[in-house]
Amino acid sequence: MTWSNGKGRGAKYGAAHQAERKARLLTVRPGDPCGYCGRPLPVNTRTWHLPHNTAGTGYLPGMWCARCNLREAAQRGARIANAKRKAQRFQRPAR
């Protein structure tokens, strides 16, 4: 995964995101535990993800391995999509 230069991904992955990630890379080292699963983070720091809170307005502590970050985002997206489908299924048809 390549990191954004602030174009194409919106403000979410712009300069503020990059600054926070860079600051965390100074404190987290390869072999430190993933903030989600606890497995050691790999040597390649490009595979580390900066985890967002569920609202996408801030960051969770530590760094996460790519596997955990992508899995958590997919699970969250599936919960949202399933809730929308369930709500549509139980709506009364318009007359």
Image (tube, rainbow, N blue to C red):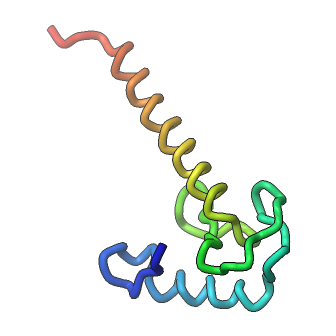
**Above or below — where is 91 with respect to 17?**
above
Identified at 38% across, 25% down, the residue is 85
In the image, taking residue 34 as reference, residue 22 lies left or right, namely left
Question: Looking at the picture, how far across and down is residue 88, in whole percent?
Answer: 34, 21
Picture quarter containing residue 53? bottom right
Residue lying at the far front in this picture: please name it: 43
**Count of numbered circles in the view:** 0
Picture quarter containing residue 95? top left
Identified at 78% across, 65% down, the residue is 34
Identified at 65% across, 72% down, the residue is 48
Question: Looking at the picture, how far across and down is residue 69, in whole percent?
Answer: 61, 58
Question: Looking at the picture, how far across and down is residue 62, in whole percent?
Answer: 75, 72
In the image, taking residue 85 as reference, residue 63 lies left or right, namely right
In the image, taking residue 50 as reference, residue 43 lies left or right, namely right
**Above or below — where is 17 with respect to 74?**
below
Identified at 47% across, 80% down, the residue is 3
Picture quarter containing residue 46? bottom right
**Above or below — where is 88 with respect to 16?**
above
Question: Looking at the picture, how far across and down is residue 63, in whole percent?
Answer: 71, 71
Residue lying at the far left in this picture: please name it: 95
